[in-house]
Image: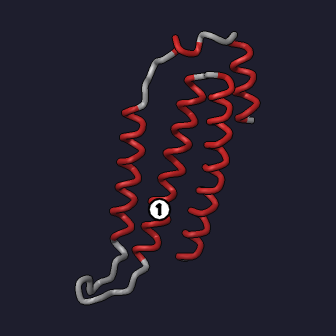
Amino acid sequence: MASESKRTVLLAFAVNLVIAIAKTAAGLLTLSSAMLAEAAHSWADTTNRVFLLFALKRSRRPADTTHPFGYGKERYFWSLLAAVGIFVTGASSKPGSLESSQAWSPRRRSMAAMKSVC
């Protein structure tokens, strides 16, 4: 069961990393604030997976004198930190900056952005 969880998190990390790179490239290429916001969200998801990998590793440690029941509950702490990190990243992003993306024609921007997502 633990190896399945690790494999799932590693796969999600790899997929999120590829998506984050693609969205960042599309956002920089098209100067689309919406695509850059999506890229930031994908980078936050990628960072979230790092927290979850760390949680899986730390929660597998065996019991010792300080923690006689083991470290299994530590997984929930690191998952909470991952969730707080995503919340802070989303709350601190700059919403509503449509004016900054008006330099390119809307059709050219949206077509380039759609090609990167599809």
Q: Position of residue 104 (x, y in %)?
A: 67, 12
Q: Which residue is disc 1 drawn over? A: 52
Above or below, 103 against 89 in this view is: above
The colour scheme used to paint the residues is secondary structure
Above or below, 87 against 4 in this view is: above
- Side (left or right) of 63 relative to 95: left
Q: Position of residue 105 (x, y in %)?
A: 69, 10
- Side (left or right) of 90 relative to 102: left
Could you tell me the amino acid type at mark 1? Leu
Residue drawn at (61%, 43%) of the image: 20
Q: Position of residue 109 (x, y in %)?
A: 69, 19
Above or below, 59 against 108 in this view is: below
Quarter of the picture holding the C terminus: top right
- Side (left or right) of 76 relative to 109: left
Residue drawn at (47%, 62%) of the image: 52
Residue drawn at (68%, 39%) of the image: 22
Place residue 113 in its image quadrant: top right
Above or below, 47 against 66 in this view is: above
Place residue 30 in its image quadrant: top right
Residue drawn at (34%, 69%) of the image: 74
- Side (left or right) of 14 relative to 114: left
Q: Position of residue 23 (x, y in %)?
A: 64, 36
